[in-house]
Image (tube, rainbow, N blue to C red):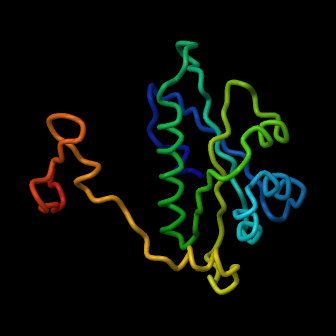
Amino acid sequence: METARWAPSSINQQPWRFLIAQKDDPETFNKLLSSLNTNNQIWAKNASLFILTMARIDSEITKQINKHALYDLGNSVTHLTFQAMTMGIYVRQMGGFDPEKTRAIFAVPDNFIPVSVLAIGYKGSPESLLEELKKRELAVRRRKDLSEIIFTGKFGDSFFKEQDQEVIKI
Protein backbone atom coordinates (compact mmCIF):
# COMPACT_ATOMS: atom_id res chain seq x y z
CA MET A 1 0.00 0.00 0.00
CA GLU A 2 2.97 2.29 0.56
CA THR A 3 3.87 2.17 -3.15
CA ALA A 4 0.27 3.03 -4.04
CA ARG A 5 0.39 5.98 -1.65
CA TRP A 6 3.54 7.37 -3.29
CA ALA A 7 2.28 7.20 -6.88
CA PRO A 8 2.35 10.55 -8.69
CA SER A 9 -0.90 12.42 -9.22
CA SER A 10 -2.09 15.60 -10.87
CA ILE A 11 -1.39 18.58 -8.59
CA ASN A 12 -0.49 15.96 -5.95
CA GLN A 13 -4.19 15.53 -5.09
CA GLN A 14 -3.90 11.78 -4.51
CA PRO A 15 -7.57 11.16 -5.36
CA TRP A 16 -7.40 7.43 -4.65
CA ARG A 17 -9.01 5.72 -1.70
CA PHE A 18 -8.93 2.03 -0.83
CA LEU A 19 -11.28 -0.05 1.29
CA ILE A 20 -9.67 -3.31 2.44
CA ALA A 21 -11.70 -6.43 3.13
CA GLN A 22 -9.58 -9.20 4.65
CA LYS A 23 -10.64 -12.82 4.76
CA ASP A 24 -10.22 -12.81 8.55
CA ASP A 25 -12.97 -10.14 8.67
CA PRO A 26 -15.72 -12.31 7.12
CA GLU A 27 -18.43 -9.66 7.40
CA THR A 28 -16.57 -7.06 5.31
CA PHE A 29 -15.01 -9.70 3.04
CA ASN A 30 -18.39 -11.28 2.22
CA LYS A 31 -20.04 -7.91 1.65
CA LEU A 32 -17.44 -7.01 -0.97
CA LEU A 33 -17.52 -10.54 -2.41
CA SER A 34 -21.30 -10.19 -2.84
CA SER A 35 -20.78 -7.15 -5.07
CA LEU A 36 -18.75 -9.17 -7.61
CA ASN A 37 -20.39 -10.68 -10.66
CA THR A 38 -21.00 -14.45 -10.51
CA ASN A 39 -17.92 -15.51 -12.51
CA ASN A 40 -15.64 -13.40 -10.33
CA GLN A 41 -17.24 -14.71 -7.12
CA ILE A 42 -16.49 -18.33 -8.10
CA TRP A 43 -12.72 -17.94 -7.99
CA ALA A 44 -12.23 -14.73 -5.98
CA LYS A 45 -13.72 -16.20 -2.81
CA ASN A 46 -10.30 -17.85 -2.31
CA ALA A 47 -8.38 -14.55 -2.25
CA SER A 48 -6.69 -13.42 0.96
CA LEU A 49 -8.20 -9.97 0.68
CA PHE A 50 -10.08 -7.58 -1.54
CA ILE A 51 -9.50 -3.91 -2.11
CA LEU A 52 -12.27 -1.67 -3.37
CA THR A 53 -10.63 1.16 -5.31
CA MET A 54 -12.29 4.56 -5.40
CA ALA A 55 -11.48 7.90 -7.01
CA ARG A 56 -12.42 11.34 -5.77
CA ILE A 57 -13.91 13.00 -8.82
CA ASP A 58 -13.94 16.60 -7.58
CA SER A 59 -10.76 18.57 -7.10
CA GLU A 60 -9.95 19.55 -3.54
CA ILE A 61 -8.21 22.62 -4.96
CA THR A 62 -10.45 23.93 -7.76
CA LYS A 63 -13.73 22.31 -6.61
CA GLN A 64 -14.28 21.37 -10.28
CA ILE A 65 -14.28 17.88 -11.83
CA ASN A 66 -10.83 16.32 -11.56
CA LYS A 67 -10.40 14.98 -15.08
CA HIS A 68 -7.25 13.12 -14.03
CA ALA A 69 -8.72 11.26 -11.04
CA LEU A 70 -9.23 7.93 -12.81
CA TYR A 71 -5.79 8.11 -14.43
CA ASP A 72 -4.21 8.86 -11.06
CA LEU A 73 -6.08 6.00 -9.36
CA GLY A 74 -4.97 3.62 -12.13
CA ASN A 75 -1.39 4.79 -11.69
CA SER A 76 -1.60 4.13 -7.96
CA VAL A 77 -3.05 0.63 -8.51
CA THR A 78 -0.28 -0.10 -11.03
CA HIS A 79 2.33 0.78 -8.44
CA LEU A 80 0.62 -1.48 -5.90
CA THR A 81 0.38 -4.32 -8.46
CA PHE A 82 4.02 -4.24 -9.48
CA GLN A 83 5.21 -4.08 -5.86
CA ALA A 84 3.00 -7.02 -4.90
CA MET A 85 4.28 -9.07 -7.85
CA THR A 86 7.89 -8.48 -6.76
CA MET A 87 6.86 -10.01 -3.42
CA GLY A 88 5.24 -13.07 -5.03
CA ILE A 89 1.74 -11.77 -4.30
CA TYR A 90 -0.82 -11.76 -7.10
CA VAL A 91 -3.25 -8.94 -7.80
CA ARG A 92 -6.26 -9.56 -10.01
CA GLN A 93 -8.02 -6.36 -11.05
CA MET A 94 -11.75 -6.69 -11.64
CA GLY A 95 -14.28 -4.40 -13.21
CA GLY A 96 -16.97 -7.06 -12.87
CA PHE A 97 -18.70 -5.75 -9.76
CA ASP A 98 -21.69 -3.58 -8.85
CA PRO A 99 -20.40 -0.07 -8.06
CA GLU A 100 -23.75 1.15 -6.73
CA LYS A 101 -24.03 -1.82 -4.39
CA THR A 102 -20.55 -1.08 -2.99
CA ARG A 103 -21.47 2.59 -2.66
CA ALA A 104 -24.49 1.66 -0.54
CA ILE A 105 -22.83 -1.09 1.52
CA PHE A 106 -19.72 0.92 2.39
CA ALA A 107 -21.26 4.44 2.55
CA VAL A 108 -19.08 5.80 -0.27
CA PRO A 109 -19.62 9.58 -0.53
CA ASP A 110 -21.12 11.01 -3.74
CA ASN A 111 -17.88 12.73 -4.74
CA PHE A 112 -16.09 9.36 -4.93
CA ILE A 113 -16.72 6.66 -7.50
CA PRO A 114 -16.06 2.96 -6.92
CA VAL A 115 -13.82 1.93 -9.84
CA SER A 116 -12.60 -1.63 -9.37
CA VAL A 117 -12.09 -4.46 -6.93
CA LEU A 118 -8.68 -6.07 -6.50
CA ALA A 119 -8.38 -9.69 -5.39
CA ILE A 120 -5.03 -10.18 -3.69
CA GLY A 121 -3.34 -13.36 -2.58
CA TYR A 122 -1.17 -16.21 -3.70
CA LYS A 123 -1.75 -17.88 -7.04
CA GLY A 124 -3.93 -20.96 -6.86
CA SER A 125 -4.06 -23.91 -9.21
CA PRO A 126 -6.12 -23.54 -12.40
CA GLU A 127 -7.19 -27.14 -11.76
CA SER A 128 -9.42 -25.91 -8.94
CA LEU A 129 -11.50 -23.79 -11.34
CA LEU A 130 -14.66 -24.70 -13.20
CA GLU A 131 -13.87 -25.88 -16.74
CA GLU A 132 -14.81 -22.63 -18.52
CA LEU A 133 -12.79 -20.49 -16.11
CA LYS A 134 -9.89 -22.94 -16.25
CA LYS A 135 -9.86 -22.66 -20.05
CA ARG A 136 -9.76 -18.86 -19.86
CA GLU A 137 -7.01 -18.92 -17.24
CA LEU A 138 -4.81 -21.23 -19.31
CA ALA A 139 -5.45 -19.52 -22.67
CA VAL A 140 -2.62 -17.69 -24.39
CA ARG A 141 -2.78 -13.99 -23.54
CA ARG A 142 -3.18 -11.70 -26.55
CA ARG A 143 -2.40 -8.05 -27.01
CA LYS A 144 -3.11 -5.66 -29.86
CA ASP A 145 -0.32 -5.18 -32.34
CA LEU A 146 1.82 -2.11 -31.59
CA SER A 147 0.83 -0.69 -34.98
CA GLU A 148 -2.79 -0.57 -33.73
CA ILE A 149 -2.05 1.52 -30.66
CA ILE A 150 0.92 3.77 -31.47
CA PHE A 151 0.38 6.56 -34.02
CA THR A 152 2.23 9.48 -35.54
CA GLY A 153 1.03 12.45 -37.55
CA LYS A 154 -2.63 11.83 -36.77
CA PHE A 155 -4.84 9.27 -35.06
CA GLY A 156 -4.77 5.99 -36.96
CA ASP A 157 -1.49 6.55 -38.81
CA SER A 158 0.78 3.86 -37.45
CA PHE A 159 4.10 4.97 -36.06
CA PHE A 160 5.61 1.81 -37.50
CA LYS A 161 6.58 1.25 -41.11
CA GLU A 162 5.35 -2.09 -42.42
CA GLN A 163 6.05 -4.79 -39.83
CA ASP A 164 8.92 -2.99 -38.07
CA GLN A 165 7.84 -2.94 -34.42
CA GLU A 166 11.04 -2.96 -32.48
CA VAL A 167 11.01 -1.41 -29.07
CA ILE A 168 11.06 2.37 -29.26
CA LYS A 169 14.29 3.67 -27.78
CA ILE A 170 14.07 6.97 -25.99
Q: Residue at x 43, y 76 (%)?
A: 140
- Place of residue 158 in the rendered image (x, y in percent of width and height, measured from the top left): 18, 47
In the drawing, does residue 164 fall left or right of residue 112?
Answer: left
In this view, the residue farthest toward the right is: 27
Q: Nearer the viewer, residue 5 or 139?
A: 139
Q: Quadrant of residue 56?
A: top right
Q: Is residue 34 positioned above or below 157 on the image?
A: below
In the rendered image, which quarter is residue 114 located in? top right
For the point 55% across and 14% down, the residue is 64
Q: Residue furthest bottom?
A: 127
Residue positioned 82% across, 58% down in the render: 29
- Depth check, front residue: 17 or 155: 155
Expressed as whole percent of the image width and height from the top left, the position of residue 120 reads 65, 64
Question: What's the residue at 75%, 69% (across, down)?
Answer: 42
Give residue 145's position: percent from left, percent from top: 28, 59
- Left or right, 149 with respect to 28, comes to left
* In the rendered image, the vertical position of residue 142 relative to residue 33, given as above or below: below
- In the image, residue 165 sits, relative to residue 61, either above or below, namely below
Residue nearest the observer in this picture, 15 or 68: 68
Position of residue 156 measured from the top left corner of the image (x, y, whole percent): 23, 41
